[in-house]
Amino acid sequence: MADLFAPDPQDIPAPAAGPLADRLRPQSLEEVVGQRHLTGPDGAIGRMVAAGKLGSIILWGPPGTGKTTIARLLADAVGMRFESISAVFSGVADLKKVFAAARDHRRMGEKTVLFVDEIHRFNRAQQDGFLPYVEDGTVVLVGATTENPSFELNAALLSRAQVLILNRLDASAMEELLARAEAIEAKPLPLDENARAALVASADGDGRFLLNQVETLFSVAGAERLDAAGLSALLHRRMAVYDKDREGHYNLISALHKSLRGSDPQAALYYLARMLTAGEEPLYVLRRITRFASEDIGLADPQALVQCIAAREAYDFLGSPEGELAIVQACLYCATAPKSNAAYKAMGKAWKTAKETGSLMPPKNILNAPTRLMKDIGYGKNYAYDHDAEDGFSGDNYWPEEMAPQTFYAPVERGFEAKIAERIAHWNRLRGERG
């Protein structure tokens, strides 16, 4: 019987549209932007779909690059059941239910794709729990992670899954998302060219973040076109993705070190800025630059180490942000200094030889003799005091009798080390002449 008091269908408001990012979610792998190297005909995912056979995979990439979307579309493309859990909210009990359900569906001839978001958040024991179900085909595992799988996932799990790397969305992929958003909203974004470019840059390769910003723009912006300054006033600019204790940290410090070594002050300053503006501890960066001054410059320019120590004192004295200029100065000095790793290599060779030769006795003539007994057995006897020589050089032998003289330090012909090389050659010639 009809409800006499039911509202007229015409009076029922239409359900609110979902978030823009959900409405623009791709309906096929061909619609996924920025990951053609995986989803195209020659990509790993494209080949799996063409073969109709899906193996366990780990999708590794930055936020907002399509990991969840690809997993769902992949299951649809090969006709498999899709099950999704998040390692943030799920535990062992949830996994047992998922595996039991997958086993039941398998008996009925239906295979299951288990998508695990943030899989790196499961501990080692929980990750090991996937192994028997992956091995016996109960589930095909598709894990998603923003962290380097080499560091965060068990070796046993990695050996059973192929790691596929998703790219950070580039400017053309982001522009495609903007065009799709304008098409579904049936109106252009109220931005001039510079503001549009600033919007793309602020998303830092994250498509979901970009679409959320676009949705905000469509909701609150007026009809007047905004310039970059107007856009900045309307939207909060997003900080670049940077985990100070994870892979982003090691990637950028490596890039800084390599740029310094390659004598590119512009690139070195860029990576320094990337780290400091993202909240890295300034003294950590300065410690790495100081290490560089010894490892990659050394005596080619002895002032490099002095600059770094001075920068440390200046930063302690001034604090942040004023003291960061001293770090910049040390960075630029090291980048533009002549390079030599001769001291670094000499250290490695000397340490190795010291371990191999054990406790060989130095020549007795160069040993001090603070007691009568030591004098009686020859300590300090016939020591040649260099300052007594006419040119301040005795040419004596300082190596153990059981060991031939070694060459650890070989200065390069760059910077101050070129002069050091001349001095060593001069002393070697005199030493040869004096036997």
Image (tube, rainbow, N blue to C red):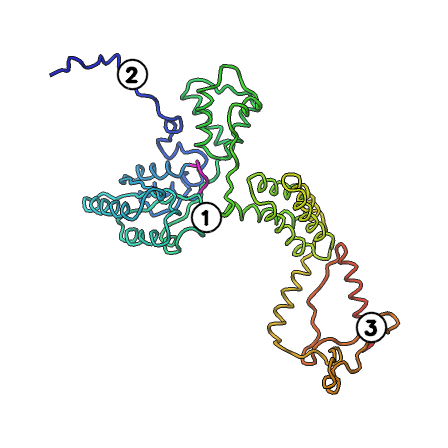
Mark 1: which amino acid? Asn
For the residue labelled by badge 1, is the local secondary structure a helix, a strand or a loop?
loop
Report the magenta residues as a range: 61-65
Magenta: main secondary structure equals: loop
Measuring from the top left, give residue 259's x and y in whole percent: 63, 47
Location of residue 112 (image quadrant): top left
- Residue drawn at (73%, 59%), measured in percent from left and top? 412
Q: In x, y percent, where is residue 124?
A: 37, 54
Q: Is residue 123 left or right of residue 271?
A: left
Q: Say which residue appears at 37% left-offset and 30% top-offset.
A: 25
Q: Earlier in the sequence, mark 2 or mark 1?
A: 2
In the image, 267: left or right of 372? left
Q: CA distance from mark 2 to mark 1?
A: 47 Å
- Where is residue 191 shown, x and y percent of the image? 53, 20
Estimate the spatial distance between the alpha carbons at disc 3 and disc 1, rounded to whole Å: 58 Å
In the rendered view, does 55 fall on the left or right side of 209?
A: left
Helix, strand or loop under label 2 = loop
Circle 1 residue: 148
State the residue position of label 3.
386
Q: Which residue is mark 2?
A: 13
- Quarter of the image for the N terminus: give it: top left
